[in-house]
Amino acid sequence: MTDVSRRAVTDPATATEPKRAESSLGELFSEMTAELSGLFRKEIELAKVETREEVQRSVKAIAAMVAAGIGALLFLWFASVALAELLDQGINRALAFLIVAVLWAAIAGVLFVAGRSRLRRVQPLPETTATLKEDVQWAKTLRH
């Protein structure tokens, strides 16, 4: 240990000196305000970016859900036509319509599961939430 560093550790007079004694309280407050303002702007920008990404994911999930809805409507239509043909004509033609309807039901099920899976992966602003928590911790350390 050098003589200067030993004195800084053991000298009680230097232990209570402020880290930036040359700065006035106004300057320190101004600097802190500028830092908080910059941090706030960065948080807003991060929230915008994350929101755009989550909206894109949501749109894809919703598109899959809409496709599943269309598939379900087609299922009902084909099932209805198949039932009508079954009642009106011989079994063979109606059975063909029923097979098509069941195929559409399977497609609708697959699309629904895919859409639900994508929708579950949507997280509302995960990075912004994490950085805001970090900012709160940082602000608490400034007070102490």
Image (cartoon, grey):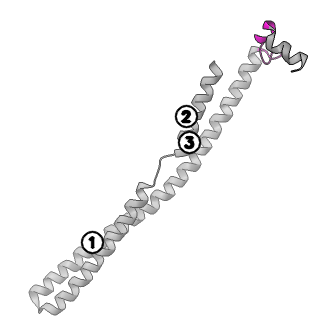
Q: Nearer the viewer, mark 1 or mark 3?
A: 3
The image's mark for residue 73 is 1
How far is disc 3 from disc 2 in space, using C-alphas? 9 Å
Could you say whether the residue bearing mark 1 is in a helix, strand or loop?
helix
Instruction: Decide: is 73 above or below 130.
Output: below
Could you say whether the residue bearing mark 2 is in a helix, strand or loop?
helix
How far is disc 1 from disc 2 in space, using C-alphas? 46 Å
Q: On the rendered image, what quadrant is the N terminus found in?
A: top right
Instruction: Decide: is 2 above or below 104.
Output: above
Mark 1 or mark 3, earlier in chain: 1
Name the side, left or right, on which 8 lies relative to 91.
Answer: right
Name the residue carrying label 2. Answer: 133
> For this rendering, which residue is in front, 139 or 40?
139
What is the three-letter code of the residue carrying label 1? Leu
Res. 105 image quadrant: bottom left
Identify the residue at image location x=55%, y=34%: 133
Q: Main secondary structure of the magenta part?
A: loop
**Region in magenta:** 12-24
Q: Could you say where residue 45 lies in the image, as x and y percent from the top left?
A: 62, 44
